[in-house]
Image (cartoon, rainbow, N blue to C red):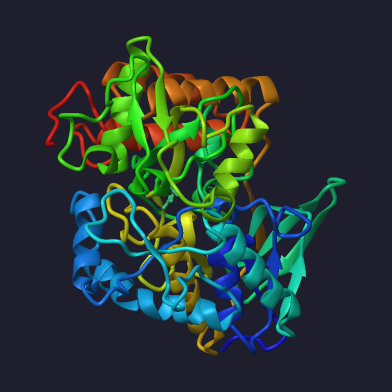
Amino acid sequence: MRHAYLPVVVVGGGVAGLATALAMAPAPVRLLCRAHDGCGSASALAQGGIAAALDPQDSAAAHAADTLAAGANHNDAAMVQWLAAEAPAAIAWLQAQGVVFDSDAQGRLQLGREGGHGAARIVHAGGDASGAVLVQALRAMAQAAMHVQWRGGVDVDGLLLRGGRVVGVRTRDERGRHEQVEAAAVVLATGGIGASYARTSNPPGADGAGLALGLAAGAAPRDLEFVQFHPTALDVPGHCLPLITEALRGAGARLHDADGNALMAGVHPLGDLAPRDVVSRRVAAEQAAGGRVWLDATAVDGDWGKRFPTVLAACLAHGFDPRRQALPVTPAAHFHMGGLATDADGRTSVPGLYAVGEVACNGVHGANRLASNSLLEGVLCGRRLGRLLADASVSASGNGPLRVIERGESLPSDQLAALRELLWRSAGPVREAGALRDAWRACAALAELGWQARLAKALLRAMRLRRRSLGAHWRQDRGCPR
Ligand code: SIN
């Protein structure tokens, strides 16, 4: 029986954490996040939207089939069927939370098209600001909810264990002060690992800290080798790069090389809307040959301020006007299909520890996530987990002395920058045994110095063990199935 006075602690203020917290009402929740206002999650940067088969010509079965095809059939098929079938209900729930999706003059939801989808089924909000609109609405609900106690500006850097069960967290505030918070259960909703790479579309906080913590506590990982690279981040100097949404290619933008030749011609039947891994590898190949790749979106019509305000603002801030000139683009680490292994309800292998959203791996995305299925997963799995935890059957008790499992020290900043470069070179869109081995050895040598090196070592180990290409894991030294 859950002790009435102990809250569930949810770590992370993105869509998955917010959906979990909201679904727990009226059971008490402490929502902890690094940013003061809950900003800073990758959810808030998501541009495309949420996939849902809403068109009468479309079906959940077709959405599921596209999800499986993108995932190279490495997916958990039952999870995929559930996700696709529940997607329309997720849209309805979001509308009930105050999310206003873009609609046409008749009030029908506008449906966009993205790579790997056989139909137009992407529901979006604020044009390309879908993630920001969702997070804003859910955050407002959570901050107003009586059962949610919100605390920003804290890093969860340890898990409390008693008798093999997670019974709380250790927090560290910006002044370095630690505090122990006991909990009926702990939910990691900490997002992905994109910021572990030198080039990413993710925010700096998507650094794998939650994954590292779960692994330190002994939670089993799954599919760590599958990292998705988005083919079109804006190719400007820096670590966290602006995303140039795939929806632009859905609206007619085209990739070309420096000589103006169509980049995807003859590469894949879906051309510019081929699955992300295919497009990313083509862009990476062009770069490896010394070229640069451009996205020409000048033929995309309509009001950019309404349809693509996020892309427009980011490009203008870097001196590019996408309405008038082609944009330099590069692949960037975008989404981790792997993570802490969970069942369909979000249970990890450690009692009392749950994971949801990108830090978790329930198998729904397989070896490569289909576009606009991530916010969907966050909403649906968060709500499912929240309802489970609201149930009084969650036990907080554990026997024995309290232990603190720490994530550990961070690497010094120069070594962290070097590690990101190493991962980019060895564990990017194209991989090869020798480079993976050397990178693993380099990480092993740094493992005592910082948790990021231990995490990278775990990622590289999984990449070395999967010797054949599958989905986003491309081994150029081995057989390539497609
Ligand atoms: C995009 O807008 O291109 C990204 C959407 C996604 O990652 O699903």
Left/right placement of residue 90 relative to residue 289 reads right
Q: Give the x, y percent position of residue 274.
A: 25, 42
Quadrant of the image for the N terminus? bottom right
| Residue 413 visible to the viewer | yes
Quadrant of the image for the C terminus? top left
Label total for image: 0
Q: Give the x, y percent position of residue 111.
A: 37, 65
Q: Give the x, y percent position of residue 164.
A: 52, 64
Residue at position x 36%, y 74% in the image: 87
Residue at position x 45%, y 71% in the image: 104
| Direction right: furthest residue | 175
Residue at position x 45%, y 25% in the image: 424
Left/right placement of residue 481 relative to residue 185 reads left
Establish if 15 lies above or below 263: below
Q: Which quadrant would residue 230 be assigned to in this image?
A: top left
Front residue (pair 147, 329):
329
Establish if 457 lies above or below 290: below
Left/right placement of residue 167 relative to residue 180 reads left
Front residue (pair 260, 277):
260
Establish if 179 lies above or below 387: above
| Direction top: furthest residue | 290
| Residue 163 visible to the viewer | no
Front residue (pair 128, 137):
128
